[in-house]
Amino acid sequence: MICRARDEWIGKTPDTPVPLRVRVRQFERDGGICQCGCDWPIFAGDKWETDHKVAIINGGENRESNLRTLLKSHHKTKTAADVAEKAKVYRKRLNHLGLKRRKGPKIQSRGFDKTEPQRAASRPIEKWKGFD
C-alpha cells in the first residue's frame, strides 16, 4: 500500500513514549524482521519492541529515524550492552578529569547508647527525668 509521505516523528522529551502509529510504521519499514542482525521474522504473537539504534543514554535522539524493531529477548541483551557502554564511558571520563570514586563502605558512627529497659510498670520512667 502506497501512502503519502509523512513527517518524521520526534519525541518532545527523551522520555516521550513512541506512539502506536509510529511503531506500526517502524514494523512495516523493517519488514517484520528483527534488526539486531539475526534476521528472524517476527510472527503474530511474538513479543517485539521498538529500540533506539543509538541509546538515548549514549547520546541518541528520540526520533523515528533512530528506531528499529527487535525481538523482546534481543532488546534486553542490547539494552544491557548500552548500559555497560555508558558505565565504561563514565569511568573513563572520571579518570580523564582526575576524579576518584570512593571505594569501600561508608564510615560507621558509634550510634546511640542503649537505655535499660523498664522492668516494672509501677516504677516511674527514668528516661525523661532530666527534662522536668
Image (tube, grey):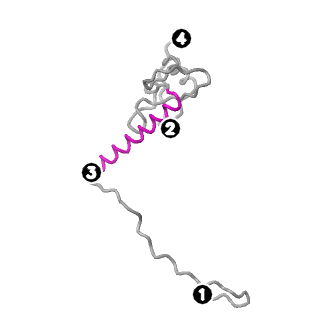
Q: Position of residue 119 (x, y in %)?
A: 68, 86
* Residue 55, magenta (yes or no): no
Q: CA distance from mark 3 to mark 4?
A: 52 Å
Q: CA distance from mark 1 to mark 4?
A: 82 Å
Mark earlier in primary sequence (3, 4): 4
Q: Amino acid at mark 1?
A: Phe
Give the quarter of the image for residue 82: top left
| Disc 4: which residue | 3
Q: Amino acid at mark 2?
A: Asp
| Disc 3: which residue | 97
| Disc 1: which residue | 131
59 shown above or below 37: below
Mark earlier in primary sequence (4, 2): 4
| Span colored in magenta | 70-94
Q: Position of residue 77 (x, y in %)?
A: 46, 35
Mark 4–mark 2 contact, CB under 8 Å?
A: no
Q: CA distance from mark 2 to mark 3?
A: 29 Å
The disc at residue 15 is: 2
Quick one: SS at disc 1?
A: helix
Mark 1–mark 3 contact, CB under 8 Å?
A: no
- Residue at horizontal 66 percent and vertical 87 percent from the top: 125
Given residues 65 and 42, the one toward you in this image is 42
Mark earlier in primary sequence (1, 4): 4
In this rendering, would 128 be left or right of 105? right
Q: Position of residue 60 (x, y in %)?
A: 40, 33
